[in-house]
Each structure stands twice: as C-alpha cells, then as structure tokens.
Image (tube, rainbow, N blue to C red):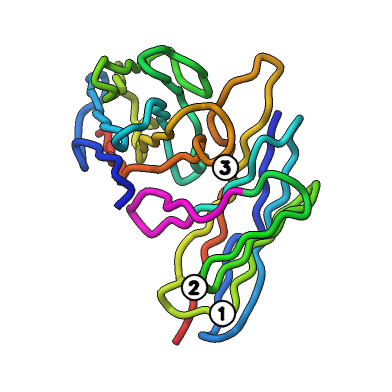
C-alpha cells in the first residue's frame, strides 16, 4: 500500500458526460501528479500540482482539468467524454519537487474509467 | 522530446533462470531514471531511482544499473511472484527548473514459470 488513495475504483459513464476523479496524497506529500494509462499509449503524464498551484502540464486535453485543494487532495475533471477516454487514471504523489528521494512518485491504485 | 524504449516487450522465464530487462532512453538532461513494477489492474509500485551513469541499486533479487544511454534491470534466480510488468521512466531537467512528470516506456511483461 503506497498510502495514496483514489476514488472511485471503477466508473462507467456515457459519451458526452462529465466525471470527477479524486486523489488523496500520502501524508506529508505536497505534490500530486495525474497520469492516464491506456493499452496503446502506455502511462502518460497529464498534469502536476504542488502545494495548491499548477506546476507542470503534459499531454492533457483541454476537456480535462484538475485542481489541488488546501487539504492537498486533488480532483481530475473529465468532460465531454469520448470513447477514447476509457483508460486507467492514476494519481501519484511526492514530498516536493526538490530533487533526490523527495521527488520519488508513489502511485495510487487507480480509477478505471469506461465510457460507453 | 524525451523517449523511453523497453525491451523485450514480453519475457517468459523458468523459475531460477536469471535474465535482464533493457531500458534505452533519450533525454535532454537526466534528472532521474525510475523502475516500477506493476501488477495487473494495480498502480505502479516504486522499485529504484538512479541518478548518474555507473550507479547501481539492489533489492532482493533485483539489481538496476545505469549508463548514459540505457538502464538494465537484472533479475537473479526469479520466483513466480516476480511475475509482473516492469516499467522504466525518466525525468528530465528543463531550462525553467522544477519537476515534471515522468516519461514512461511501455514496459516488459515478465512471466516466471514454476
């Protein structure tokens, strides 16, 4: 158990809908990352937050957005869902983006999203 | 653009048969190279971080090494419970500094037969 929690574990929805995925980082971790894992693309970095502020963006679609709250939990919002958005979504956390062991990212168990 | 290529895509070994997994990478400036293990339907589990060429780290039957172009994950006398997908990832330095997400390879699916 990495100490990172994600809810829900599974989510089934229809095209065009909007969903919110939630992540609680490990105790003491200030940085949260979101990743998408699909069969053809592998694990892809979406976005990073550090202490409530957006810090880095990867291959995140404009239909997707995220935020990190004062209690450090984070939410990933996916809107206007398409069939191709079906994937595993992982959250990871690290202490801080300050180099060395503090940057090691620990992953949560993921949310499996199925868009029908 | 950072790139990570892992080989082989899949590997089937007999219990006790040692082997190595390869991770070739291209990155502007390496901040760290990471190895993770992923079981089906679960999140990646952290194994090692390597920071500079020549560095080696060991954990039980696993040993990770790093050169300027590639990393190897050596598995010695594996057991069936070592069966998993092993993922390699890099993190790069950027001119603006600060952290960024990891760039992952597609993984090596390892099966250890009893």
Q: Label 2 is found on which chain of the structure?
A: B
Check residue B13 in the rendering and tell me which mark sits there, or answer none. 1
Nearest the viewer among A13 and B101 is: B101
x and y percentages locating residue A26 in the rendered image: 31, 37
Q: Is residue B44 magenta?
A: yes
The image quarter in which residue B95 lies: top right
Q: Which residues are magenta?
A: B37-49
x and y percentages locating residue B32 in the rendered image: 64, 40
Residue extending farthest right: B68
Q: Label 1 is found on which chain of the structure?
A: B
Please report contact status of discs 1 and 2: CB closer than 8 Å, yes or no. Answer: yes
Find the distance from the CA under tag 3 to the CA under tag 1: 24 Å
Instruction: Report the quarter where the C terminus of chain A lies.
Output: top left
| Disc 2: which residue | B111
Q: Find numbered disc 2 in the image and state the secondary structure of the residue it sits on.
A: strand
Q: Is residue B96 magenta?
A: no
| Disc 3: which residue | B104
Q: Residue at x 53, y 66 (%)?
A: B59
**Which is more N-terminal, label 3 or label 2?**
3
Query: In this rendering, do the residues under marks 3 and 1 share a single chain?
Result: yes
Above or below residue A106? Residue A82 is above
Nearest the viewer among A111 and B62 is: B62
Check residue A86 in the rendering and tell me which mark sits there, or answer none. none
Find the distance from the CA under tag 2 to the CA under tag 3: 20 Å
Q: Residue at x 77, y 49 (%)?
A: B53
Taking the image as shown, residue A70 lies to the left or right of residue B80, namely left
Quick one: label 2, few (<14), some, or many (20+) residues within 10 Å? Answer: many
Quick one: label 1, few (<14), some, or many (20+) residues within 10 Å? Answer: some
x and y percentages locating residue A50 in the rendered image: 42, 20
């Amino acid at each position: 158990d990495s100490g990172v929690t994600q809810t829900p574990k599974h989510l089934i929805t229809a095209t065009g809908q909007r969903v919110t995925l939630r992540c609680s980082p490990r105790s003491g971790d200030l940085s949260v990352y979101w990743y998408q894992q699909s069969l053809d693309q592998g694990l892809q970095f979406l976005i990073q937050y550090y202490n409530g502020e957006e810090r880095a963006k990867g291959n995140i679609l404009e239909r997707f957005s995220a935020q990190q709250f004062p209690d450090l939990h984070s939410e990933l919002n996916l809107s206007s869902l398409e069939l191709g958005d079906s994937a595993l979504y992982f959250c990871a956390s690290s202490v801080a983006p300050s180099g060395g062991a503090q940057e090691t990212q620990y992953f949560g168990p993921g949310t499996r999203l199925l868009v029908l | 653009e950072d790139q990570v290529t892992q080989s082989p895509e899949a590997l089937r070994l007999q219990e006790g048969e040692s082997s190595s997994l390869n991770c070739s990478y291209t990155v502007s400036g390496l901040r760290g190279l990471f190895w993770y293990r992923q079981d089906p339907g679960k999140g990646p589990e952290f194994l090692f971080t390597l920071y500079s060429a020549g560095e080696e780290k060991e954990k039980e039957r696993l040993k990770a090494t790093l050169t300027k172009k590639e990393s190897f994950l050596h598995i010695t006398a594996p057991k069936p419970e070592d069966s998993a997908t092993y993922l390699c990832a890099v993190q790069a330095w950027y001119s603006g500094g600060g952290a960024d997400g990891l760039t992952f390879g597609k993984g090596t699916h390892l099966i250890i037969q009893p």
